Image: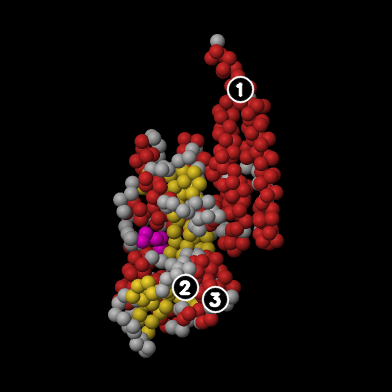
Amino acid sequence: MRIIGTGAGAFALLLSLACGPASAEEDKVVVLTSYPQETLSLFESAFEKANPGTRLEIVWRMPRDAMPYLLESGSHGVDVYWSASARNYSELASRDMLAALPADPALPQEIGGFPIAEPKLLYRASEIAAYGFTCNRKTLAARGQHCPKTWAALADPELSGRVLLPVPSKVGFAPLMYEILLQRLGWEKGWALIGEFGANATLFVPGGAFITDRVAKGEEDVGVTIDFFAQAAAAGGAPLDFVYPDIVGFSPAHIAVLASAPHPQGARKYVEFLLSDAGQRILASPDIRKLPVRPSTYATLEAGYFNPFTEAKNQSVDYDLPAAQRRQALSSALFDVLVTDRQAALRDLWQSIHRAERAAGNDARALAIVKTAREAATWLPVSAAQSQDRSLQSSYKDQMQAWARLVDEHRAQAAKDLQSLLSRNEAPSRTAAAQ
């Protein structure tokens, strides 16, 4: 196997393995991928053993660099594209650059309503990852707490500042995670929950230690992330557990064959191997810990290995992936307006709401004020229908200042009403204490 990569154009030959250059007659397959060397080495050994005489050649590119590379003349001789960027596959399909994969009735087209194969089989998932919570069992135990099991539990005031939450405009895996909540709960209820636990959390952007590293060090108790990140850290000795919450979102990686593939036979062999039980078991190995897309593979795995096909039976949703991809940038910008750019004020508002709820008791007037404050705290400047407007999806940046102004107006009035309510409720207590 040869691994060649440039990243953003800065690398040349990264690594050369095996036995040097092959003869011109030798069968081979050229795979463009962003998988780490450890994963690729496992596949090299197993694939070439299963296919004697077929040489695996890897071209390494991150997803942001893969598209320009593939769009250049001849796609640089790439046969197979294997990566986790759904948007890249969608664009390649729209350009008629992919060849249909063979049908396999043992490989599902969807999981719990979430599509894992393109309708015409121009690409399909090769494995799945799932979103959830990684928790530091030691720091939580010291606080007398447990790892949360639901998304709503992230809004628990007892966890204020102790949950590390990725910002979707900055963290590549995050937009799909939030979109799954929006589609499962509905636009308004989804944003209401995201805003409430977003106010309660510490926001994560790249640039320092990763989510699992920070949670392992005890900087936060809980991190919202992808399962295999947490499981890999735990396998390395970190005091981390991972919980699949009440709504489990899936993040598939895909595989496709280029229509211009110069080695179609090798491409077919590689795809067949990757999607076979043997290939799927490699993806589920302790060093990788991905979720196979072939349901029968789970019968061969260790007891307790998370089975998304079993879980999906309990929480199906008709997930619209193209719609999610179209509004992804808009939704990420909306998160910044609602949460990222004004988190301190949002946190104060939710703390006031919780205090007022505790103090209201059966006071109908107080409860009405709290209800109005909750509505203001979760008010949205963009409706579900507007989020699907193609013109707004392309011009949302022009609207962000107006969104921010309207959000601030709603929240400022709610904060004022709550402060007045809390002042009246707390005044008798202060008087009694003084006497």
In this rendered view, identify the residue nearer to me: 202 or 260.
202
Q: Which residue is mark 3?
A: 71
Query: Which amino acid is tagged 3?
Result: Leu
Find out whether the residues at labels 1 and 2 contact each other: C-beta distance under 8 Å: no
What residue is rendered at 66% in x and 46% in y?
404
Gap between marks 3 and 2 measured at Cα: 12 Å
Under mark 2, the amino acid is Tyr
Q: Residue furthest top?
A: 435
In primary-sequence order, the first of circles 1 and 3 is: 3
Q: Residue at x 55, y 34 (%)?
A: 351
- Residue in the foreground of this view, choosing between 398 and 92: 398
Crowd band around label 1 with a 10 angstrom C-alpha radius: few (<14), some (14–19), many (20+): some
Distance from disc 1 to disc 3, alpha carbons, whole Å, reads 65 Å
Q: Residue 317: name its quadrant.
A: bottom right
Of 367 and 160, the residue lying toward us: 160
Q: Which residue is mark 2?
A: 81
